[in-house]
Amino acid sequence: MTVKLHTVGEDALMLYLGASADEQTLARVQAAAAAIEHALGSELIDLVPSYASVPILYDPLRSERLQISRRVRAAVDALQVQHAATARSVVLPVYYAAESGADLESLATRAGLSSDELIALHTAPAYRVYAIGFAPGFAYLGEVDERIAAPRLATPRAAVPRGSVAIADRQTAVYPAESPGGWNLIGRCPIPMFDPAAQPCMPVAVGDSVRFEAIDRERYLALGGELS
């Protein structure tokens, strides 16, 4: 395993564990994150496992950079890489329709498919959560079937509705809150993707396996979904 550790601020380090997003690299990221949490304890302020890296934020008033760097390297050198036991299988319901996914029909046409065929391809795989970013609860999931992969919109929308399920390139995601965005919208999920008052605050975590389940309009509204 090639490990690179760089200083990115007075209180932050960036650990690189690979150059691509794949299952093996994700396993390294998860194992490294757990090892660093254990090694730094209360001196660690935060870390954010991502595709192939782990940003590490520490308390500079309690430990100096070289000491933290040595402990991080020692923790990573000693770790046993394996898929994290905490990874879960999560099912997210989605209402796929023109009224809930503005780009569903155009994306299907672009792919030479019917809307039902596109939905079937989107719900077929189990997607790995590779990273959470952009906004709290925005989980980057991959990879969608190459037949329904699509580039980001040339002009992003000023406001994408909360719960929108979308595709960009070979990634898919659920918008946790209304925000600007340029992904292709194909449906909506009624499950909150981020709730700071809940424990845990997100229904998915890096490393989890996510499947989408198609539901009808009535079920979507019954689960608390909104249409606007």
Image (cartoon, rainbow, N blue to C red):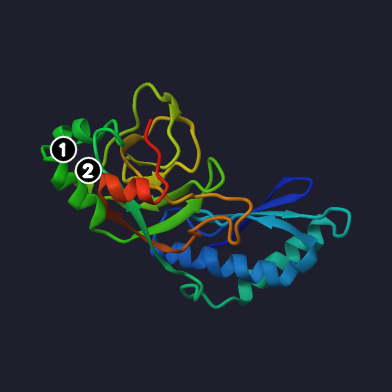
Residue 113 lies, in percent from the top left, at 11, 40
Q: Which mark is residue 148?
A: 2
Residue found at x 48% / y 59%: 204
Q: Secondary structure at mark 2?
A: helix
> Considering only vertical position in the picture, is 184 above or below 22?
above
Mark yes or no: residue 1 visible: no
Q: Quadrant of residue 76?
A: bottom right
> Considering only vertical position in the picture, is 171 above or below 156?
below
Residue 20 lies, in percent from the top left, at 42, 53
Indicate the amino acid at tag 1.
Ala
Nearest the viewer among 2 and 120 is: 120
Q: Residues within 10 Å of mark 1 (few under 14, many from 20)?
A: some
Residue found at x 17% / y 37%: 108
Nearest the viewer among 177 and 9 is: 177
Residue found at x 56% / y 46%: 136
State the quadrant of the C terminus.
Answer: top left
Indicate the amino acid at tag 2.
Ile
Residue 126 lies, in percent from the top left, at 31, 61
The Cα–Cα distance between marks 1 and 2, rounded to whole angstroms, is 6 Å
Q: Residues within 10 Å of mark 2 (few under 14, many from 20)?
A: many
* Mark 1 lies on residue: 111
Q: Which mark is residue 163?
A: none
Mark yes or no: residue 100 visible: yes
Asked whether, in this view, residue 110 is left or right of residue 154, the answer is left
Q: CB under 8 Å between callouts 1 and 2?
A: yes
Asked whether, in this view, residue 155 is left or right of residue 32, the answer is left
